[in-house]
Amino acid sequence: MSNSRRSRASGNDPATAVAVSASSGHGIPAWTAEEIRGLGASTDLRTAAQIFGLSPNTAYALARRGDFPVPVIRAGNQYRVPVAPILAALHLDVDPKPPAGPPPTTRATT
């Protein structure tokens, strides 16, 4: 049986790593801003908990009490966490600006 959970490479660039995971010192790399944005519009509660350095049990307890660090949407027996509030809570841009480069060239018409 294959694992459908998202996996990440361990060779993250420390300059772009988001240092929020309390467990990052225990062999689990911190999430980068690009990885968080790559999750899409929302993610599951376990992934959001990992980003914030929380155990799954703690995350579910906080979500039940309405005390998770960001808004949580409950749909039936599932919890979904929007990615934009995660980025905002970590003081990261939701939509990063494209890298600065030379201005686009225009064709001269004659």
Image (cartoon, rainbow, N blue to C red):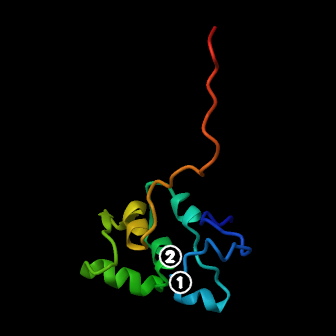
The residue at which mark 2 appears reads as 51
Category of crowding for the residue at label 1, using alpha-carbon neighbours closer than 10 angstroms: few (below 14), some (14–19), many (at least 20): some
Quadrant for the C terminus in the image: top right
In the image, residue 29 lies at what x, y percent?
64, 80
Outermost residue, front side? 110
Real-space Cα separation, disc 2 to disc 1, in angstroms: 6 Å
Snapshot quadrant of residue 35: bottom right
Vertical placement of residue 109 versus 68, above or below: above
In the image, residue 59 lies at what x, y percent?
40, 81
In the image, residue 70 lies at what x, y percent?
33, 72
Kindly indicate whether the residue at mark 1 contacts the one at mark 2 (C-beta within 8 angstroms).
yes
At horizontal 50% and vertical 76% (from top left) the residue drawn is 51
Looking at numbered disc 1 in the image, what kind of residue is underneath it?
A: Ser
Quadrant for the N terminus in the image: bottom right
Outermost residue, left side? 65
Q: Which mark is residue 21?
A: 1
At horizontal 61% and vertical 25% (from top left) the residue drawn is 106
